[in-house]
Image (cartoon, grey):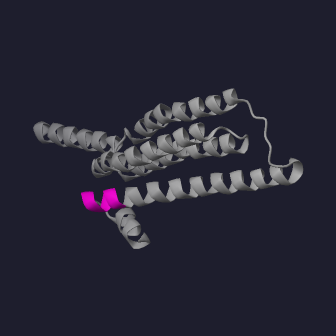
Amino acid sequence: MLSGLQTFLNAKQPSYLQAVSSLRLIFVGMVAVQTSLALVLGVGLRAWQVFQQGASTNAPTLLGAILLLMALAQLPIGLVLAEVFGWQGGKQAALAATLVLAVVWSSVMWFAAFAWLIGSSQAVLLVFLLVFGLAYGVGIGMCNRYANIALRPPKASQQGSQHKQTDEATSTQAS
């Protein structure tokens, strides 16, 4: 599994299949780590809360809704940030875009953990899971776009090769 990622990172010009499978692996891995951390923290804090004061919580419904709105706001923010990181082209830009998208969109589960911790309704928690599922599915699909970005030469090297070609043409004409 990691050998495919290493092949992608070491390849001078990776294939589309190498790029998309490696970027999906990175996306899934980062989402899994972020989600696991959020769930462990949420369960740990909830257990501590129950131990300290019993199972009852008097959380306002408004706070759960605010957390949900904050989680929804992360979707366009993550997409814009990923596009900014990926605009240069090349493997590094594609990796950066994939990581940024995975981390920002995984924040939905952090908000869900806090909503669960304060005792939000099951309906609110279900919406969190639906938003997370949607973000996860779209994120996996976005890895196709980032694979195409990985196959493009970085803009800096494109400009460098254009200057080189211009310099060569100028020197040929001068001769």
Residue beneath the point at 62% across and 29% down: 65
Q: Name the residue nearer the viewer: 25 or 127.
A: 127
Residue 80 position by quadrant: top left
Q: Where's residue 130, x and y in %? A: 48, 42
Residue 67: x and y in percent read 63, 33
Q: Position of residue 60 (x, y in %)?
A: 73, 30
Q: How many marks?
A: 0
Q: Which residues are magenta?
A: 15-21
Left or right position of 160 against 43: left
Instruction: Looking at the picture, tell me which residue is in the foreground, 101 or 91.
Output: 101
Q: Can you see residue 15?
A: no
Q: Quadrant of the N terminus?
A: bottom left
Q: Residue at x 78, y 55 (%)?
A: 47
Does the magenta-highlighted stretch encompass residue 17? yes
Q: Does residue 70 sit above or below 44 in this rendering?
A: above
Given residues 161 and 53, the one toward you in this image is: 53
Against 10, is 69 above or below?
above
